[in-house]
Each structure stands twice: as C-alpha cells, then as structure tokens.
Amino acid sequence: MPKEAKARVAKPQNKIPALDMPKRPGTSWNMFFREHMEKVKASGKPVVPTVEGTIAAELWKKLSPKEKQVYQDRYRANFEAFKQQTKDRLQQMKPAEYKQENQRRQTLREAGKKGLPALKDPNAPKRPLSNFFLFAKDLRESGKYAHLSLKEQSKAFAEVWSTLPDNEKGVYSETNRAAMEAYKIQKANYDALAS
C-alpha cells in the first residue's frame, strides 16, 4: 500500500515585493559577535564561522556585567532609533503601499509564515464613535465619575445610558450620523488612493 504524500504548503505564484523598511538592529550579542569577527578577519587568520562562534560565545560569557552593559546600551539606542525610523516610514507610506504590503503579508501567512500582522495606516480615516461611546466620552470628560475605576465607570455609564430619555439619546444619534457620513466620504477617498 503506497504511503500518502504529505500535504505541501503552496508557494505563492505571484510574489509581491517587500516594501523598503528600516532594518531591525542586531542584539547586544550580535554586535559583540560582529566585532569579534572583524578582529579575526583583521588578524589575517582564516575565518571559520562555526569555530569563531564558539570562541565568541566563550568570550561573551567571560565579560563582566559592566562590559555587557555597554553592548546592551548600544542595542537599546539602536532599537529606539529603529522604532522611530519605522514610525516615520509608516507615516510616509501611501495607501496603495499599505494595501500592497498587507496583501504580501496575507499571502505569506497563507503559505504558513507566522508573526506577520497586517499594517495599520495611521493616516487612514478613523471610524467615528458609536452613540453610546460618544455619551461615555462626555461623561468621562465631565469628571463626575473620575473617582471610579474604568470597569466601574463602564457599568455606571451603561446604567445612566439605559435610563436616558430618547430625546437626549437622539442628540448622540444625530452627532454619530453626521460623523458617519463624513467618515464614509473620507473612507471612499482613501480607498480610491489605495486602488
């Protein structure tokens, strides 16, 4: 009886190119290892990465906490710069680039790649708050419920909302309706840019 073939993950046919994004910095260990490799190359000695990896690991273990802290501080500074560069890059991206990158990520997720969430465009129009959340925002800003925890505030807002007369709820409905109409126009314009 023949063995059943294992199901293979289909590779994407039309590969979508990745966007040009800032490169995540290496860890403190990576920095130390790169420096070690540069020293070995500069000495003229033949470089065998597996051997040098073992030697570098031993040297890393022998570093004092103070010496390791220098590398960790450099990594933190590099990582903060990376986060800022990524944030700036996301701000500069056009809607079509977000759409393309999210399609690429979706294709990779379907092919089995993990850890690739969809990108959210910070410049995309935001959906307006619902009637209840507009009401809750007003109550929160009034300061009357500031002494309560968020969970208690939510319960109190729900109780007040349930007893609110329809004419007062109508004010929030009208505000929401107007905001929703403006949002639909903005969203249509944004989607047109993404096409």
Image (spheres, rainbow, N blue to C red):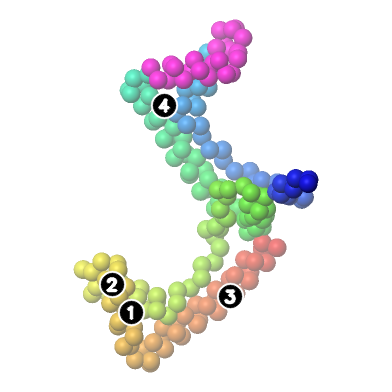
Mark 1, secondary structure of its residue: helix
Mark 2, secondary structure of its residue: helix
Q: Nearer the viewer, mark 1 or mark 4?
A: 1
Of the image marks 3 and 1, the number of the one nearer the N terminus: 1
Q: Check if residue 125 falls in the magenta segment.
A: no
Query: Looking at numbered disc 2 in the image, what kind of residue is underneath it?
Result: Gln
Q: Is residue 173 above or below residue 194?
A: below
Q: Quadrant of the rendered structure where residue 98 is? A: bottom right
Give the CA separation, mark 3 to mark 4: 50 Å
List the residue tagged with mark 4: 71
Looking at the image, which is closer to me, 112 or 162? 112
Give the CA separation, mark 3 to mark 2: 31 Å
Query: Looking at numbered disc 3 in the image, what kind of residue is underneath it?
Result: Lys
Q: Nearer the viewer, mark 3 or mark 2?
A: 2
Give the CA separation, mark 4 to mark 2: 46 Å
The residue furthest left is 147
Q: Residue at x 67, y 50 (%)?
A: 111
Local crowd size for mark 1, using a 10 Å CA cut-off: few (<14), some (14–19), many (≥20): some
Query: Looking at numbered disc 4 in the image, what kind of residue is underneath it?
Result: Tyr
Of the image marks 1 and 4, the number of the one nearer the N terminus: 4
Of the image marks 3 and 4, the number of the one nearer the N terminus: 4
Q: Residue at x 52, y 43 (%)?
A: 85
Give the CA separation, mark 1 to mark 2: 9 Å
